[in-house]
Image (tube, rainbow, N blue to C red):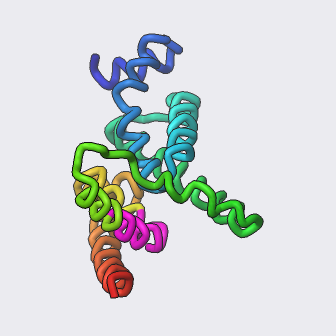
Amino acid sequence: MKESELIEKIKGDDGTALRTFYEIYKDMVYNVCYRMLNNRQDAEDATQDVFVKAIRSVHRFRGNAKLSTWLYRIAVNTGLNYTRRKKIVAWLSLDFLVGKDEYFPDNAQAGPDLELEKNESEALVQQAIQSLPPRQRTAVILQRYEELSYKEIAEVMKTSLSAVESLLHHAKDNLTEKLTALLK
């Protein structure tokens, strides 16, 4: 089914089209949300919110960009909103410390030593990424984990190509500095 047909059927509240839409994009949306939130439960909740928002606002989709780019934008905004909410909750309560062990998915296929080393490395990188300013963090997640091109990142973030290049350059410098400090 073509993207334009899918959108029209979703606008018409076609149940099959809604399921197809969800099946096609659920992993992409979840991955963006997980990378931004570092928590499975929050990522699952955010993923649901993204699809609800997308379906409610599909009538505003003009087709100027690909459907995936539009959905990335909704996912990024939702992730940023969750992050803001989490910071407020953390400020109001010390309960934010619960759930730190949920940051990384299980992978029992590697040996225990290699797995431990990999998890420690992932934790350090993830910690450094999470400490970046929001726009740098978003650009890194979209480029590194979602493998979007600079042009696609610019579309998702509604900014220029040169701004994306600058964000990623500064993010790389900041990550180098943060990881060097963490490894000392």
In this rendering, position of residue 52 left or right of residue 19? right
Q: Is residue 33 above or below residue 129?
A: above
Q: Residue 184: say if magenta.
A: no
Say which residue appears at 53% left-offset and 14% top-offset.
13
Q: Position of residue 125 (x, y in %)?
A: 35, 68
Question: Between residues 29 and 181, which one lies in front from this camera angle?
Answer: 181
Q: Position of residue 76 (x, y in %)?
A: 47, 52
Q: Position of residue 49 (x, y in %)?
A: 57, 38
Give 112 or 168, whichever is nearer the viewer. Answer: 112
Which residue is located at x 40 percent, y 32 percent? 26
- Residue at figure coordinates x 53%, y 59% from the top left: 100
Q: Quadrant of residue 80?
A: bottom right
Is residue 173 placed above or below 19 in the rendered structure?
below
Disc count in the image? 0
Quadrant occupied by the N terminus: top left
Q: Is residue 150 visible?
A: no
Q: Quadrant of residue 97?
A: bottom right
Extreme-front residue of the structure: 112
Res 19 quadrant in image: top left
Q: Quadrant of the C terminus?
A: bottom left
The residue at 36%/43% (across/down) is 69
Residue 123 within the segment the image draws in magenta:
yes
Is residue 127 among what the camera can see?
Answer: yes
- In this orientation, which residue lies closer to the viewer: 52 or 164? 52
In this picture, which residue range is highlighted in magenta? 122-137
Is 178 displayed left or right of 99 in the figure? left
Our reading of the magenta stretch's main secondary structure is helix
